[in-house]
Amino acid sequence: MSSGLPKISVAEALAERIAALKPGALPQATTRKCEDLLIDVVGLCVTARNEDYIRSSLAACDDDGPCTVIGHARRLTAAGAAFVNGTAAHGEDFDDTFEGGPVHAGAVIVPAVLGACERHSPDGRMALIGIAVGTEVLCRLSLVVPKAVHKAGFHPTAIFGAMGAAAGVGAALGLNAKQMVDALGIAGSMAGGIIEYLAEGAWTKRLHAGWAAQSGIRAALLARSGFVGPRTVFEGVHGLFHGFAHTTKGDYGALVGDFGTCWVTDTLAFKPYPCGTMAQPYIDCARRLAARGIKPEDVAEIVCEVAEGTVHRLWEPLADKRRPRNGYAAKFATPYLLATGFVHGGVGLGAFTESAIRDPRVRALAAKVRFVIDPNNPYPNNYTGHIRATLGDGSVIEERQPYLRGGAQEPLTRQDVTDKFRLNAQHGGWGKAQGDAALKMMAGLYQGKIDLSSLQN
């Protein structure tokens, strides 16, 4: 061992805790959240199955195999299926969010673990423990140096997703502690994902979840076969946080401390709108403002108090956020999103078509929106919304949303998650019978054998 290296690394401490977890030992709340994640992710894969970015992703794969690509007849290798399914699940930005991160766990972990289990270990109990572990690792990693990865220009879901997927797949395949350390170490060299997609609404953010999912599978399989990775992958001089957060100093206790006894997975939020997470409370404020009977034409100006950490993704450049160049860019444009919510009473999957983003009433209202930075905003620990509208007669009306609906303070019910699945399945072209069959299968998946055949086509 080289001088200056720790006797027990962060990855080794984490791997010991993961190895100690046994199937059937998860808390009921965590199990239920993993059930919700499965339902939500499958619905998201279906809703995106006919989109151009998924057609392109599937066409680019040349690794046919035994694993299910959700919503398609073609089958791929475990890594190939995880890539396409992860890309689909994240593609419409309708997937879950961990508010402390922010990161999106389900779109990475569920496709990775399902692909690995379908090919290598079709045991639903192991899939459950894998999804729980992978989600927990991904979310906790985002707490080590909050906001730093985003600030450095990287997408945290992509960076931490590769690590979480390696842990989740490793747990599902029964890797021992040494193999788990190697899997994490290997995955560190597979992590990546820049946020330059914001410049023109390119598709690359969509593939970040899929790429992380397939990377986790490959890392776990390499480790299982004896390939060695660096045990100081997290805190090392040239480790993950040095590379993507420009520091090796962080709260590693947030990752390891009470892992396995306290589950942050339980607090995952499910989105009510298919767009950037931090914009969602602002949409709620806009809808309430409109519900007062105020018309868009009555508004002279809207000023929103925002968190500094959200500005570079959701508010600037302001001209582009008021008039997004395409439907995908619109998902990360708060002025457009709150204007849409105000004018149309909500933001659905149809809000991102070429015609929708050119709606003259929406554009006119979005042009009146600006922001000011609130230095006391609690982001990323809590996502809030605020609108101060000045009307043409000089009167001022304010609305505030103190938290993210669908999150820990107002979680979706199982019925809400199921209703969302049905909406997404319908949008993707599935009939009621096929949706019902999928829900029935998923209800027993974690107790039986992994058989995803009902999710094809």
Image (tube, rainbow, N blue to C red):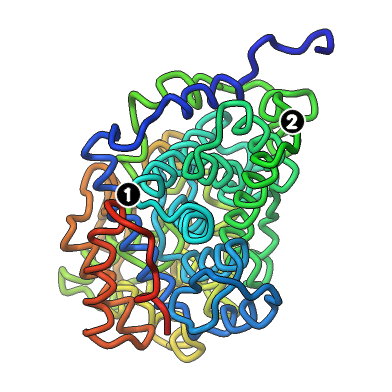
Q: Is residue 76 above or below residue 305?
A: below
Quadrant hosting residue 430: bottom left
- Relative depth, front residue between 99 and 80: 80
Q: Is residue 303 left or right of residue 343?
A: right
Q: Where is residue 310 in the image (x, y as percent from the top left)?
A: 52, 49
Q: Where is residue 450 in the image (x, y as percent from the top left)?
A: 38, 60
The disc label shown at residue 239, or none: 2
Q: Where is residue 136 in the image (x, y as percent from the top left)?
A: 43, 38
Quadrant hosting residue 289: bottom left
Q: What residue type is labelled 1?
A: Cys
Give the residue displayed 45% in from the left and 48% down from the top. Answer: 306
Q: Which of marks 2 and 1 is nearer the N terminus?
A: 1
Q: Where is residue 323 in the image (x, y as percent from the top left)?
A: 54, 77
Indicate the secondary structure of the residue bearing disc 2: loop
Residue identifier under label 1? 34
- CA gap, disc 2 to disc 1? 30 Å
Give the residue displayed 28% in from the left and 55% down from the top. Answer: 36
Q: Is residue 57 above or below residue 374?
A: below
Q: In this view, does 358 lie to the left or right of 40?
A: right
Give the residue displayed 61% in from the left and 54% down from the top. Answer: 212
Q: Which amino acid does label 2 sit on?
A: Gly
Indicate the secondary structure of the residue bearing disc 1: helix
Give the residue displayed 45% in from the left and 18% down from the top. Answer: 257
Which quarter of the rendered picture does the C terminus lie within? bottom left
Q: For the residue carrying disc 2, how many other residues have a C-alpha within 10 Å: few (<14), some (14-19), or many (20+)? A: many
- Relative depth, front residue between 33 and 378: 33
- Relative depth, front residue between 161 and 282: 161
Q: Decide if residue 207 is in sight here.
A: yes
- Relative depth, front residue between 59 and 308: 59
Q: Is residue 446 above or below residue 41?
A: above
